[in-house]
Image (cartoon, rainbow, N blue to C red):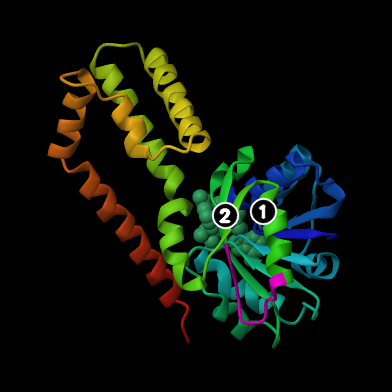
Amino acid sequence: MSTIAVLGAGKIGEALLSGLLHSGRPASELCFTERHPERAAELTRRYGVESVSVGDAAKRADVLVVAVKPQDIEPLLAELAPLIGPDSLVVSLCAGLPTALYERRLPEGTPVVRVMPNTPMLVNEAMSAVSAGRYATPEHVRTVAAVLSSVGKVVEVPESQQDAVTALSGSGPAYFFYLVEAMIDAGILLGLPRAVAEQLIVQSAVGAAKMLADSDEHPVILRENVTSPAGTTINAIRELEKHGVRAALLAAIEAARDRSVELGRAHED
Ligand SMILES: NC(=O)c1ccc[n+]([C@@H]2O[C@H](COP(=O)([O-])OP(=O)(O)OC[C@H]3O[C@@H](n4cnc5c(N)ncnc54)[C@H](OP(=O)(O)O)[C@@H]3O)[C@@H](O)[C@H]2O)c1
């Protein structure tokens, strides 16, 4: 593996650059493209990674990681198509965009791997799901999985499951942040200083996440262990059930899946 170019160094593109550097990849094996010169200069100053044109990225890198918003994909692919060679591997991080879109716009036979990552990539704790496009070989998928496993965990799924993955783990961190925000508000309601409420909830979230990751117990068992008969937790659980929190999560994640499908449809020919 030599050079990786990130095309579109916004939130997720920056998270990938930062995560790869954290994991020990030298800055000289990375480059990125960015529309705003001030942001490009800021990223180079922060990470020591060079900002290049799309043309230079295509020449220099063997792995081209597309990290623009789905609505910005068409002009980027039009720019990229005449520039890439048969050895370029294209990796899409874009929610909802099928590999078939890339395959139609890029030269015949271009290998494409679709990935749904998430922002905990910034702290080397990403969850990424990878799917091979029509021309991507198992070796291409292994290459992409190896890159992503240096910034978190990786699973391979059929591309038909990527909209569900997008709704679950792509957007997933936002649901946890939302929950933490609401629980901090509850602390304020109960009269705790904001800083104390924040510390209590963030550390509880870190501890709970660690228990979920490290123990073999099902989440139900972990929750039951904190739910003693006639205790405080069961009173809270009753309210969560009464307010339909479980149903709200199911509906919310289904809505996120539907939006991912819709984003993909917007790019059908
Ligand atoms: N954020 C997440 O949690 C997350 C998780 C999983 C997947 N994703 C996927 O990752 C992709 C990027 O999301 P994001 O949240 O990182 O968006 P973002 O912060 O808007 O980043 C996209 C960046 O690409 C730049 N850009 C657009 N067209 C370009 C071009 N032709 N050449 C160079 N740079 C270009 C944008 O510039 P401007 O500022 O001028 O628009 C922006 O800086 C999306 O497709 C999204 O579906 C995001």
Could you tell me how far apart the alpha carbons at marks 2 and 1 are, in whole angstroms?
A: 7 Å
Residue 58 quadrant: bottom right
Work out whether 133 lies above or below 122: below
Question: Taking the image as drawn, is residue 33 in sight?
Answer: no
Question: Which residue is nearer to you in this view: 113 or 104?
Answer: 113
Q: Secondary structure at mark 2?
A: strand
Residue at 70% over, 85% down: 109
Disc number at residue 128?
Answer: 2
- Residue 226: x, y in percent? 31, 24
Start-end of magenta stretch? 130-138
Three-letter amino acid code at the position of disc 1: Leu
Q: Is residue 198 left or right of residue 188?
A: right
Label 1, on which residue? 148
> Mark number for residue 187?
none
Residue 83 within the segment the image draws in magenta: no
Vertical position of residue 237 compared to residue 49: above or below? above
Specify the quadrant that holds the N terminus.
bottom right
Which one is nearer the viewer's eye here, 231 or 122? 231
Q: Position of residue 185 (x, y in %)?
A: 30, 24
Name the residue located 70 percent from the left edge and 80 percent from the top edge: 110
In the picture provided, is 36 more to the left or to the right than 261?
Answer: right
Q: Residues within 10 Å of mark 1 (few under 14, many from 20)?
A: many
Q: Residue at x 66, y 66 (%)?
A: 91
Quadrant position of ligand 1: bottom right
Q: Residue at x 31, y 59 (%)?
A: 254
Q: Is residue 143 left or right of residue 257?
A: right
- Residues at discs 2 and 1 in contact (Cβ within 8 Å): yes
Local packing at callout 2 (Cα closer than 10 Å; few below 14, some 14-19, many 20+) is: many
Question: At which x and y percent is residue 62?
Answer: 80, 67
Instruction: Tell me which amino acid carries mark 2.
Output: Ser
